[in-house]
Image (tube, rainbow, N blue to C red):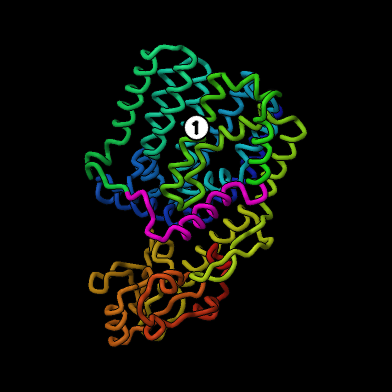
Amino acid sequence: MRLRSKVLLVIAWLAIVAPQIVLGYGSHGDAWLVGRAALQMWSSGRYVASRSTGFPLFEILVTPLVHAGGWYLSNLLSLAAGLALLFAFFRLADRGELSHPSPAILAMAFLPVVVTHSASTMDYVPALALMVWAYVLLREGRNKASAVLIGLACGFRLTSGLLILPWAIYVWKSRRSLRPVATGVLLATAVGTIAYSPVLLTYGIRTIHLTIQVDLPTRVLIGGYSALELLGIVQSVVVAAVLVYSLRRGGPAAAVSETPWYAFHVSNIAVWIPMFLAMPYKSAYLMPLLPSLILLLDRLAGRRAFASICALLLSYHVIRLDALGGESGRRYVKFSLSSGYTIADIQDRRFKLATRRAASTCPITRPTVLMLGDLWIVIGNDAWSWDDGLGMFRRTDGLLYVSGRILDEQKLRDLGMRGYRLVVWRGDKWEYVRGCDFDWQRYVDMIDDLSEFFGTPIEGRALTDR
C-alpha cells in the first residue's frame, strides 16, 4: 500500500475522531466510571476497579491523564489505540493479506463503533488493537509474541483472553503439534495473570454475573437490538446475506475453507457470539469479532460487492434505520429513520456536558433531588460534594442533589416528608416504569423539558430520548 494512501487515511481518520475527544469521557456511563476510578486511584495511591471485573492496565494508564487533564487527555489514550489498530491493518495490507486494501481498512478502522470508542475513555479499542496486532504477529509466524499480546489485552479487558482459542486452532492447523499450542497458551495465561494482577491482588477473584435478570422475551429483544446496533439493522442483514452467499460451495470460499486462516476467523466469530448471548448489554461487546468479519468479507466477496458493503457500513455514521419506538420504560418495535450512530453519540455527549453545566449553576429555590446524571454531572466537578447523610451528591449551595433513580418507596416517602422535591426526567425513567411495584408518581415529579427545569437551553440530545 502506498505511503500517500496511508497518510491520507490517517489524516481522514484523525479529522473524524479528534474533534470528539473534547466531548466528555464518553456517551456511556462506564466511561465516566473510569474517570471516577482514576481520580480515586490518584488520590489514594491504590488500585480501584471502575466496574465489574476491573480493567486494570487501562485504568492505571489513564489515571495520570485524568488527573492532569480530565477527559481532554484520557481520551487520547483511546485515540492512540485507534491509530495502532489502523496501522495494524496497514501492516496486513503491506503483507498482501488484504484483497481489497482501502475498502478493508475503511470498513474496519472507520466503522462508527470504532470511531466513537476511539474518542472516549473506554477500554474497547485499546483491547481490540492489541488483539489485532496479536493476529498480525500470528500471521507472521511470531507465535510467542502473539501470545504475549493476547495476555496483555487481558489487562485491558479480561474477556480478550478468549482470543487464545482461535489462536490455538490456527497454530494447531499450521503446525500439527501440541507443543507450540501448549507453549503459547501457557505464555498468554502467565502474561494475562500478571496484567490482570492488580484486580486479583486488590479484590481476589470477583464474581461475574453472566445473565441479566429479565424474562426470556425481553432478553431476546435486548440481545437482538444490541447486536443489530453494532453495524446497523440494514448493514447487518446485508453483511449476513453476503457472507452466507459467499460461503456456498465453490468460488473463493472453497480455496480457503480448509486453511488455518479460515479456521481462525470462523472460530473467532463463533467464540464471541455465545459470550454476547450471555451478556447482551452493549453492542460493543461484539467488537472483537469485527476484524474477522471484515477480513472474511474482504477475502470472499467480490471487489464491487465489498466496496458497496464498505459504503453501506460507513453510511451508519449519518443515518440509520431504527427499530426502537415508544419512550423510556415503554419501548416497542417501530421502524424509522434517525440520526446515524456517530451523530447520535455526539449529540448524547453534548447533552451530558450541557446538563453538567446547567446543574452546577441553575437557580434552585427549594431542596431538590434530581434523579439524572449522577455520573456525568458530579465526577471531577468541584461544584459538588458527597453528602453522607443522604447518600448522594450535593451542590455547594445545598439545594440541589443528584442521584440515580430511587426505587425504595420508604426512602422516597421520607425525603418527601422532609421537604425534598424529587424529580425524574421523562427520557430516563425506565426503572420506574418497569421496576416499581408501587405508585412512584405519588412521590416523584416527572419533568418533560429539562431546559425549562434548568432555566437554560440544553444542547444535544440524549440517546434515551428517542
Q: Amino acid at mark 1?
A: Asn
Place residue 111 in its image quadrant: top right
Determine whether, in the image, residue 166 is placed left or right of residue 237: left
Q: Position of residue 209 (x, y in %)?
A: 33, 50
Determine whether, in the image, residue 380 is placed left or right of residue 349: left
Q: Position of residue 357 (x, y in %)?
A: 48, 68
Residue drawn at (53%, 79%) of the image: 448
- Helix, strand or loop at mark 1: helix
Q: In the orientation shown, which residue stands out farthest toward the front?
A: 249
Place residue 180 in its image quadrant: top left
Q: Is residue 251 above or below residue 376?
A: above
Q: Main secondary structure of the magenta part?
A: helix
Q: Quadrant of the N terminus?
A: top right
- Does residue 58 appear in this view? yes
Tell whether position 216 is magenta. yes
Within 10 Å of disc 1 (Cα), the crowding (few <14, some 14-19, many 20+) is many
Q: Quadrant of the C terminus?
A: bottom right
Which residue lies under the disc numbered 1? 268
Q: Position of residue 393 (x, y in %)?
A: 33, 69
Residue drawn at (47%, 31%) of the image: 131
Residue drawn at (27%, 83%) of the image: 414
Tell whether position 2 is magenta. no
Residue stretch rendered in magenta on the structure: 209-235
Q: Position of residue 420 (x, y in %)?
A: 34, 83
Q: Is residue 144 above or below residue 295?
A: above
Determine whether, in the image, residue 425 is placed left or right of residue 40: right
Between residues 194 and 266, which one lies in front from this camera angle?
266
